[in-house]
Amino acid sequence: MTTHTAASPEPPAKWRAGDLPMLSRLGPLRRFAEIGIADYPREERIRLAIINVMALLIAVTSMTYVATYASFGVVKYWPLIAVNLGLMAIALLAPLAHRINDIAAVVLIWVAEYAALFFFVRALGHNSGIQLNYIIGAAVAFAICGLGHIRLVVAAVLSGLALHLATWFLYPPGSARITADVGLLHNLYVSSAVTTFGIVALVVGYALTKADRARAEADRLLANILPEPVIDRLKQAPGARIADAVSNASVLFSDLVGFTSLSQELGVARTVEILDRLVTEFDRLAALHGVEKIKTIGDGYMAVAGVSRPQSDHCQRLARLALALPGLVATLSKTHDVDLRVRIGIASGPVMAGVIGADKFSYDVWGETVNLAARLESHGLPGEIQVSADVRDALGEEFLLTRRGTIPIKGVGMVETWFLIEDASAGRDAGA
């Protein structure tokens, strides 16, 4: 057992306000749930708050049994009343044990509850059904302690099982110290069964809910990193290497002209604000046109189409995305009172793609087509969308392009390039 030492206690007002929003749902129980948990890390505070609420429920239940026994005769059942009052006192004081360490309270409750249950069955016999409550100890141990205290969990489960079996064989009805009223025995058996089934159902439901939420959160995080088809492949074959050669796809690079020097004037806060708004809007348009964002590098943005899933119109999708970006940048520039223009390059051809890395992994695309798209962007003009001849051929008559001519591109040589002007099909559709 290790003693918990708080390195730097946080002011209760700070964490109560927003760090544990779950406590606000407890209503009047909140103050009791907060006793003794302030100096622990967030996850521990959640667990200890649950222990406090459990202790309070034990106290309330014990008081209910006091009333039940008293209604059948205080003189006859006074030992059971006294033990329940003692159990109630221990439960109410248990949160103070958090000052010792993070398991002191649960150990105190565990020992007191198990001992009290044994006493009750010894007094009334196993026909009372009180030994069913040992099953609750096994279920609650996993929910409260988790795998972080697996030895404590195993001890609680095994000792609960041993005591459950012991009370059944040691205390048949004829061995009861107190000859209880039949009505009381029925009352105790029903309440024990209902409590056991209810608590086990709650614990299992809580565990399944947490598992579903964790799975949904993991899926959401994966969706922000990997394309959906790649996620599906990883789920079907966990650990499999994702490496694809795509014979024909399209790649887009965009860059904000002069943003690096402008950011020196804007400062960190405004730079991040503008970039965040731009990338968010770029992401929205990428999703709208069914293309995949690969990554951002500073103020650069890379997207592809036809890579993780086949798309016969991959080039057209990227072209329509590219045509929407200059107007978006102009609108945001006006909103933020800055002068920004975007430079875009698009290339089509074979690419390679795959999931790279184990820590902070990413889905990336590479190859000559990717290099060409990057060069077309960097050798382009502000406000223009420069494309390769392959892109021009793929777009055909649906789009209006003007020939820029043959230009030297570093690492590639002399390349014939075109400027993408507009989506001609959109005009024809509007006219129709």
Image (tube, rainbow, N blue to C red):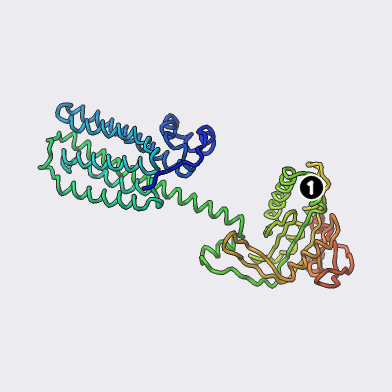
Is residue 143 in sight in this rendering? no
Q: Residue at x 75, y 67 (%)?
A: 371
Q: Secondary structure at mark 1?
A: helix
Indicate left or right for 167 with 238 as reference.
Answer: left
How far across and how far down the image is residue 42, in percent?
49, 42
In this figure, which residue is indicated by the disc labeled 1?
264
Q: Is residue 206 above or below residue 312?
A: above
Tell me which corner region of the image, top left, top right, bottom left or bottom right, holds residue 136.
Answer: top left
Indicate left or right for 245 with 45 as reference.
Answer: right
Indicate left or right for 414 with 32 as reference.
Answer: right
How far across and how far down the image is residue 146, in percent?
40, 50
Q: Residue at x 45, y 48 (%)?
A: 209
Q: Residue furthest left?
A: 174
Tell me which corner region of the image, top left, top right, bottom left or bottom right, holds residue 273.
Answer: top right
- Image quadrant holding the C terminus, namely bottom right
Q: Nearer the viewer, residue 326 or 144?
A: 144
Q: What amino acid type is highlighted by mark number 1?
A: Gln
Q: Nearer the viewer, residue 351 or 156?
A: 156
Q: Nearer the viewer, residue 377 or 152?
A: 152
Is residue 215 in sight in this rendering? yes
Q: Residue at x 31, y 44 (%)?
A: 197
Q: Is residue 290 above or below residue 110?
A: below
Q: Is residue 207 above or below residue 64?
A: below
Q: Is residue 235 above or below residue 70?
A: below
How far across and how far down the image is residue 270, in percent?
74, 43
How far across and how far down the image is residue 406, in percent?
88, 69
- Please give the count of numbered marks on the rendered protein: 1
Q: Residues within 10 Å of mark 1 (few under 14, many from 20)?
A: few
